[in-house]
Image (tube, rainbow, N blue to C red):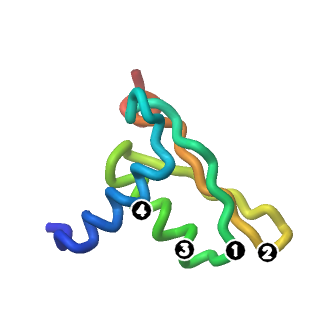
Amino acid sequence: MVDDTIVKKYRRIFQSVSNDKQWKLPTKPVTVRNLKDAEFMMEAISYFVGGAELKDNKDGTWTVESRGYYHYIGA
């Protein structure tokens, strides 16, 4: 069971990157400077759509994005 406080944080993150018209579509890519933040963002996005990708940009930043719910369920 996931703590309600964590779910609220996940929801806030997911709403900031999800497609405004259809949440099941791919998310907007977000670049952050902290790996721990990137990993938490991945967890948040994955909680809602089933997956997310992390890219090391080789400049001290990481980009997180998701292909969307339909991709991860195999639709």
**Residue pictured at 45% horizontal, 48% vertical:** 51
Q: Dot 4 lies on which element? A: helix
Q: Are marks 3 and 1 in contact (CB under 8 Å)?
A: yes
Tell me if 19 is positioned left or right of 49 in this view.
Answer: right
Q: Are marks 2 and 4 in contact (CB under 8 Å)?
A: no
Q: Dot 3 lies on which element? A: helix
Q: Which residue is mark 1?
A: 33
Q: Which residue is mark 2?
A: 60
- The three-letter code of the residue at mark 3 reads Asp
Q: Dot 2 lies on which element? A: loop
Neighbours of disc 4 within 10 Å: few (<14), some (14-19), many (20+)? some
- Pair 3/4: label in front: 3
- The three-letter code of the residue at mark 2 reads Gly
- The three-letter code of the residue at mark 1 reads Arg
* Residues at marks 3 and 4, CA–CA distance in whole angstroms: 10 Å
Q: Position of residue 44 (x, y in %)?
A: 39, 60
**Residue pictured at 62% horizontal, 75% vertical:** 35
Dot 3 or dot 4: first in sequence order is: 3
Q: Position of residue 36 (x, y in %)?
A: 55, 78
Q: Which residue is mark 4?
A: 43
* Residues at marks 1 and 4, CA–CA distance in whole angstroms: 17 Å
Dot 2 or dot 4: first in sequence order is: 4
- The three-letter code of the residue at mark 4 reads Glu
Rendered image quadrant of residue 6: bottom left
Dot 2 or dot 3: first in sequence order is: 3
Q: Position of residue 64 (x, y in %)?
A: 60, 56
Dot 1 or dot 2: first in sequence order is: 1
Q: Farthest residue toward the top?
A: 75
Which quarter of the figure is the C terminus placed in?
top left
Q: Which residue is mark 3?
A: 37
Q: Are marks 1 and 2 in contact (CB under 8 Å)?
A: yes
User: Looking at the image, is 62 positioned above or below residue 16?
Assistant: below
